[in-house]
Amino acid sequence: MAGESMDIEVAEKQLKALEHSEQHYFNSYNHHGIHEEMLKDEVRTRSYMNAIVQNKHIFKDKVVLDVGCGTGILSMFAAKAGAKHVIGVDMSTIIFKAREIVKVNGLSDKITLIQGKMEDRDALPQACWTRCSTPDRYLAKDGLIFPDKATIFVAGIEDGDYKEEKIGFWDNVYGFDYSPLKETALSEPLVDTVEMKAVVTDPTPVLTLDLYKVTPADLAFSCPFDLVARRDDFIHALVAWFDIEFTACHKPVRFSTGPHTKYTHWKQTVFYLKDMLTVQQGEKVECSLHNRPNEKNKRDLDIKVEYRLETQDPNRQAEGTCLYKMC
Amino acid sequence: MAEAYPRSDSESVSSSDNEEDWLNKPGDEDEDEDREQISVVSLLDDKVFPDAPSMLAHCKDKFGFDFLAVRDRLGLDFHGCVRLINFVRRSAKEAAPLPQEITAEHLADDKLLIPVLDDDALIFCLDELPASAPTQAQDKGKAAEKQAAGNGEVPVDELLQKNAQLQAELEQLAKQFTNYRLAVEQTLDKRWGVDEEGEKGAASKAAAPAEPEKKQKDESAYYFESYAHNDIHETMIKDTVRTNAYRDFIYGNKHLFAGKTVLDIGCGTGILSMFCAKAGAARVLAVDNSAILDKARENVFHNKLDGVITCIRGRIEDVTLPVDKVDIIVSEWMGYCLLYEAMLPSVFFARDRYLKPDGLLVPSHASMWIAPVSDAEYLAENVDWWRDVYGFDMKAMQAGQYVDARMTVMPADAVCGEASAFRMLDLHTAKVEDLVFEDPWQTTLSDKAEALDGFLVWFDCFFGESRQEVVEAKLSAKEWAAAGRERVAFTTGPFDTATHWRQGLYLIDKGKAKEIEVGPGKKIVGQIRYAIPDDHARGLNIRLTWGLEGGDKQSQTWLLH
């Protein structure tokens, strides 16, 4: 009974609870910039579009849940592909814009948008299909997840110039020693684009997540892997990226965010090593990657990389451990 | 980067049972329970009734208003009934008499879908009311349907009831959306800040952060936090236009610094303090309220300057300095469009409290500039783009483009008229009041003016060698620097190397603005107003007025948040 007045209060409370810096986001270009960036990422958006609109037979008459729907673009793809109904959920106030967008495109009767955290909503209709990061709760027995497979890759790179610019910079700032900031710089993985020619080792898959089976506990992991040098060169850093697959599609759709392919807004992530490794073709660097959510802030990641270069040459032997914090 | 907005776990998002009510299908078992507890407020006075029929009877008897008759006469559906209820309630609330005969026109306003009464029980028991007297046509249909029902199909009544239920559900959803939008609009337009600030007028707020109120403190905490990370300092230090200017002035004027006591406000990593120490200062006090100060202290130590530089963490207004007066204040306080961040009042505070009467401020002057912009390409890529996103119209995303100033580096040829200097601040004498103003400006359009798309605002910064130095109001950094040997000044404008301040782009909302005739030689005059938003003491609220000389003026306001 008290439904709608409660909703005003809840919405207001949610908005008021936001940090001041976040309050303005609702109508802020500065906040919307991120959505512009994501939409303009053609690799990303086009892959989702192809996975959905080329598979109308899968979406026809289904109920679809869009988790973190943003501007609603994926919900609208699903509606266009014939879904019976789409439920889009997002915590951000972008949901208010999404509602306007859905309305302008005449899809209000097909798409219901809900502001909130996925975890807090127990009242979503029971039978949901497709693209759902909480399959345990809402996904129908034979339901599908779009995408359903993610693989993390790592490679070693020669990145002397840029390491000098980003890390070495702090050794001499207008004639001053800034080494305290160098430590911080080393512990922050750098999100940037890496050129293919910088890649020294074979790209190596480290971890594959099957979204039908993965549990939150699986997101804290330790993976050993070997990087094999393709040529004689130096390794200044490891670079990590991921590939995404929509295996449920009639013709599988996949995209990669690696250095070998087109730019995406995720770019790649570079982990600078304290040492520089000198490798010869065919030599192996034994590595392990440890990842776990930060205890204080679960959205931050604590990452540890261990490496050991196996070589007959005692002068080039190297091993070490680097700690990173990704926030 | 995930599509979902990063949700911090500290956000209090309550998930009460009520919140979920609207998703439950009507017809749930507990619905009857709810009905027993309802109280229906009269449409025309404030009497309360246990159910709708008795209330409607009261209205009919006492006021001669027959709700059911009006409903049947106009053939109102569920929506229509809601409109009618809200129409009558609104009239009663405003003490306006009801029209002789209520017609469909009276109910056309979509605002009538917004409940006048919170939790209007009448709306919830609409489907309990006696059904309308069926018309002949309906009768016929019903008869046919009854026949069908006799043949083993679903009874019509059940279908009708189901239909009513679904309509009610739909209506709930529609209201939900309206309410959300309303809540957000109200919250944004009126309520944020108001609650905590109480009844204090905007004028007293605009005067500056004199009294540290709770809200401002919180906001400042966020502000200081934002300077705790490496990135922002890397960006600032690597802005060579900025850092070189300070370095060149300090190293080029060692005679000014030798043996002096210097105060560095907002020292960050300590770079300016170390310049001063290298230039021969006897003592440098480096003050910052951000956690970066720990790094500054380390930097100072590693560079063996800890004998000269003392790092002090805190707001300049709060800390106790180990000296009573200083000879020089160095500060890099400039924000976007010069005054965003509102750090300058802190520099004024320190100047008035600590600077010797003949002391020097570095920099000494700052000026603000505005120019008209014409850039079709920019608009196509950044504004019109939203109208066709993978075949969908996302014009809703365009609204913010005209609400916020955009910080961007514009190409010089986007500027389509003379730049106009609208305010020069002599920092030795300027006061907090000088930072809230409305100044005139004017420009003559060039041949690049194909259309007037917006305005660009930037600032110049001057490093005078003494308090007596005068910088003429309309002189650009370049002109001033060229006029004296080894003078140091820099601009953040579009005609020179870009800085991390970029420029402030103010796009005209062409949906609202009147188009004005543009072309080479046309003269545009206007005003520019800098104010501080009520709810964000470190933000800016900028209003521009413009029009052809002698013609009509129009204005638009933008936010820097």
Image (spheres, coloured by chain):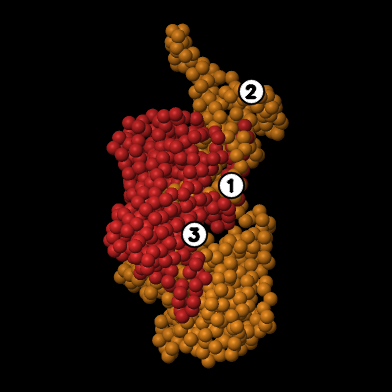
Chain colours: A red, B orange
Q: What residue is at 32 percent from the left and 44 percent from the top?
A: A254
Q: Left or right: where does residue A75 sit relative to residue B31?
A: left
Instruction: Kindly indicate whether the residues beneath marks 1 and 2 are on one polypeptide chain.
Output: no
Q: What residue is at 51 percent from the left and 62 percent from the top?
A: B560
Considering the numbered disc 2 on the image, is that residue within a helix, a strand or a loop? helix
Alpha carbon separation for disc pair 1 and 2 = 31 Å
Compared with residue B381, is residue B388 higher up or lower down, i.e. above or below? above
Q: Residue B32: give its label.
A: 2
Q: What amino acid type should be assigned to the residue bearing mark 2?
A: Asp
Crowding at mark 2 (Cα within 10 Å: few <14, some 14-19, many 20+): few
Q: What residue is at 67 percent from the left and 60 percent from the top?
A: B214
Q: What residue is at 32 percent from the left and 31 percent from the top?
A: A57
Compared with residue A51, is residue B355 higher up or lower down, i.e. above or below? below
Q: What amino acid type should be assigned to the residue bearing mark 3?
A: Leu
Considering the numbered disc 1 on the image, is that residue within a helix, a strand or a loop? helix
Q: Which residue is mark 3?
A: A323
Q: What amino acid type should be assigned to the residue bearing mark 1?
A: Gln
